Image (cartoon, grey):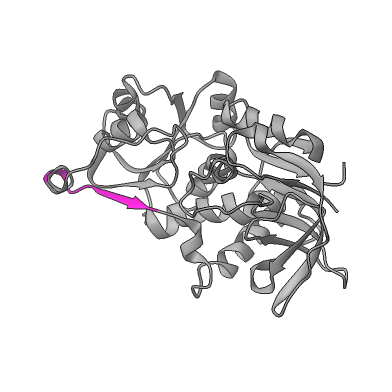
Amino acid sequence: MRAIQITEFGGPEVLRETELPDPVAGPGQLLVDVDAAGINYADTHTVEDSYLSRSTLPMVPGAEVVGRTARGRRVVALTDNGGYAQKAVVQEYLAHDVPDEVTDGQALALVVQGLTAWHLLRTSGRLAEGESVVVHAAAGGTGSLAVQLAKTFGAGRVIATASSKDKRDLALELGADVAVDSAPESLKDRLVEANGGKKVDIVLEMTGGPVFDASLAALAPFGRLVTYGLASRTPPTPVQAAQLMARSRAVVGFWLTHCLGRPGMYREPMAELLEMTAAGRLIPRLGGVYPLSEVVRAHEELRARQTFGKLVLDVRA
């Protein structure tokens, strides 16, 4: 089968197309003929071995696939890597049947980024009716879904941030009440101004560095900053307990891996997201489809923040 493999850690240049033997499914697993694989920002960390879980070589990256089983089931599934290939083995309990109304790209947008957005708001952020929500990188795969879900879940005001006017316009189109520049300089002031002069209740943050620092400073008493990434590859200023106590603020970390296998935290929200998408109440945005041979370009553009929405790797092309 055709696949993308890495034999050394590094940047996009280490991603190389090759021929590998077909994988074999074991007990409790499914072999999927892959139609498309999802590309996530976390993949860029996996390739350079800077992710939360360590990588081993050689490896085929890719954490999500959509395709068909030998019995013809159309499924979308999480993988333990191995997604950038024409065939992949997945755990059966991590595979979901895809409704006919949901496209491959939409299904891929939901299984990592959609579930993450759902849990950022419901589980970690504990969004209450009428609260304000800041969504950083609001035109990205997770952010574009978080904007829509925040409105659906009852947020009083959704404040989007993005790096360009086109991305801010997309966030407004998706339902954000206001969109501001994501540059860290004076970001705290822009967030407070966008919330009518009041500090904000929830921030969904995946950049790190000074964006994290500004977001924490913008939190109202009992506000929650949910951190789920480090896209800038720059750690924030260390948070002291006194900073949190003095203003009754919270910093909450989130990693989707901890939801797998826990009752009510994987299959049920995924079913809800698929149903919402099939009914047209949630619209995952497809940002680009890349043939397998152009995976390096996909990673380069993702890291350069030139993309929006869900990125898809067409393993058949």
Q: In the rendered structure, does residue 249 fall within the stretch colored magenta?
A: yes
Image coords of residue 280 (percent x, y):
69, 50
Rendered position, 247 above or below 236 = below
In this view, the residue farthest toward the bottom is 27
Task: Name above or below for residue 182 compared with residue 280.
Answer: above
| Rendered residue at 70%/66% (across/down) | 90
Look at the image and give the residue range highlighted in magenta: 246-253
Q: Quadrant of residue 96?
A: bottom right
In this orientation, which residue lies closer to the viewer: 98 or 157?
98
- Residue at 63 percent across and 65 percent down: it is 271
Where the C terminus falls, by quadrant? top right
Residue at left 50%, top 68%? 265
Q: Is residue 89 left or right of residue 180?
A: right
Residue at 66% x, 52% y is: 59
Residue 216 drawn at (x, y percent)? 28, 38
Q: Is residue 274 visible?
A: yes
Vertical side of 307 occupied by 275: above or below: below
To which quarter of the image does residue 102 belong? Answer: bottom right
Q: Quadrant of residue 17?
A: top right
